[in-house]
Amino acid sequence: MISVPESLFSDVDAALSLIQGREVIERIWRKDHTVWKPDSGNIANRLGWLSVAGLMREKVPALVSFADEVRESGFRHVVLLGMGGSSLCAEVLRQSIGSAAGYPELIVLDSTVPAWVQAVADSIEPSKTLFLVSSKSGGTTETLYFYKYFRYVVERSVGKERAGKNFVAITDAGTPLARLADEAGFRKSFLNPADIGGRYSVLSYFGLVPVALAGVDIMSLLERAEVMEKKCHAGVPARENAGAVLGAAIGAGALQGKDKLTLVVSPAISSFGLWLEQLIAESLGKEGKGIVPVVGEPLLPPDDYGDDRLFVCLRLEGDDNTAVDDAVAQIKASGKPVMTIKLKDCYDLGAEFFRWEFAVAVAGAIMAINPFDQPDVQAAKEATRRVLDLYRVSGKLPPVTTTCSFIELLSSAGHGDYLAIMVYMLQTPELDKAMADLRLRVMERYRIATTVGYGPRLLHSTGQLHKGGPNTGLFVQITADHEKDMPVPGEPYTFGVLADAQALGDFQALQALGRRVIRIHTGSGGGAVLERLVGKTV
């Protein structure tokens, strides 16, 4: 069981008493929408994740059989084409566990930045690659454009008649993607239970199909999840309930101003933050409220952290935890609240997926938030659509107006604010290091939390929090020229235009909401510009 930090004990204990008295846990399992809101808001039809592990365990033999078929067919790569909840679980397990010997290598594509699309295209042999087209709605723009591009590439390699066998659909029944899969001769379609939202779909077909094809032991993942499910079940009292205790801590902590949930994670499972970032930000960032998930931040002395932090350490046994252990010891000694979760191996991620889903549901009840919708995501989509409509007419994108400099933006930082860095460039180790350096300088000087997101992935992850959460964000959008652009077959614009329109649409949506947002365009000299940017924070 997780121990509750002493500084939060009374608040968390009061929250757990409330949870027990109002039968919140039992009502969640009964799928009672009034746990969160008096109006249903389709909540009851978003709670299938509570029992999906047992349902999917029955599907394991068929998934393993399909994985064997794919391997024996000579496929060398499996490329997942998806966004947000359709891609992040696979990316976590790809980085944490990887592909088993003899199985195809799993690659995840969730960016329209042309250099990113090109990097995937350059790393595969189309005829020996299986593409997973993954979208709950079946109409996700980015996913369908990825499909159009790679369908064209595969057809050029194997011919139109055979190309369909290189594609698999993962979607809900009756969606446009399900129909496309039938009409275009896909090798197979996996139709997910309809009562599971995207970011809660980690233990469904969306999360399991990609990693099963890479040879990951999905039965072990599901068994660990079911163990945690029992620890969170209706019959377990609130103070002993693994998910309720965590949910009470993050929910009560947020109400007391500890709304920067900061993850300190063992290196081998650091990618878990990608998935958790979306779960927390999109579920709990709305109605002017929110919890800011802070992942991948440089570890600094406790004095460089504000008093708006709740730290959660995910510690993997057997990993190189020297830096993690030292940081946690210092943070605890300083009196700041820290909770530690221990994992015995990477397959315990199956348990953590469920624990955190349940905890977020409980935190939503404490904060009086519906954790299953994303009402503010549409604003950026509509702005992007308007930008693309203008492009179709004029052949160019509208200009961007930035009202202040980066230093002026940072100078406006107040207590409880955070910096969100939104990068529309190809992610590389060099760029990651530059972003880490920038975060470190900001933390040291301004003592505010920092986040980094790569666009347009972030639109399906932290975008809801940025627009629907509290107005405590300082947003800097970093863009660059595209050295080589790529066409979207059948569309009047390129991937570069689409990515730029998505960045601009999000920028306009943030501006319209009165958020403090600036853009820094690095042109073709990205590295030099970023070095100067880091220097300017000193």
Image: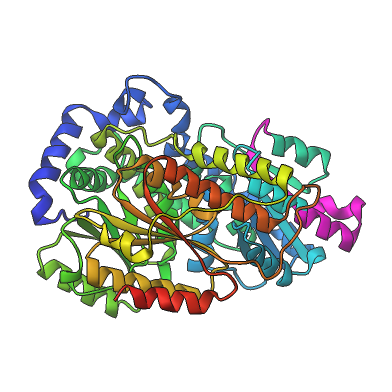
Residue 131: tell me if it is visible: yes
Residue 531 image offset from top left, x and y in percent: 43, 79
How many tags in the picture?
0
Q: Identify which residue, 178 or 41, lies in the foreground.
A: 41
- For the N terminus, the image quarter is bottom left
The image quarter containing residue 71 is: bottom right
Give the left or right position of residue 43, taking residue 380 as reference.
left
* Camera sees residue 104: no
Is 169 magenta? The answer is: yes
Q: Quadrant of residue 337?
A: bottom left
> How far from the left and from the top, in percent, is residue 419?
33, 59
* Residue 60 appears left or right of 150: left
Residue 49, horizontal then vertical, whole percent: 45, 39
Residue in view at x 51 percent, y 78 percent: 527
Q: Residue at x 20, y 33 (%)?
A: 19
User: Is the residue 26 above or below the residue 288 in the image?
Assistant: above
What is the span of residues highlighted in magenta in the rendered image?
149-175
- Report the quarter where the C terminus lies: bottom left
Residue visible at 32% across and 62% down in the picture: 408
- Residue at horizontal 35 percent and vertical 38 percent from the top: 286
Residue 10 position (above or below residue 80): above
| Picture colour scheme | rainbow
Residue situated in front as seen by the camera: 164 or 515: 515
Observer-nearest of 294 and 124? 294
Furthest-top residue in view?
Answer: 39
Q: Position of residue 530 (x, y in %)?
A: 46, 74
Residue 157 within the segment the image draws in magenta: yes
Q: Main secondary structure of the magenta part?
A: helix
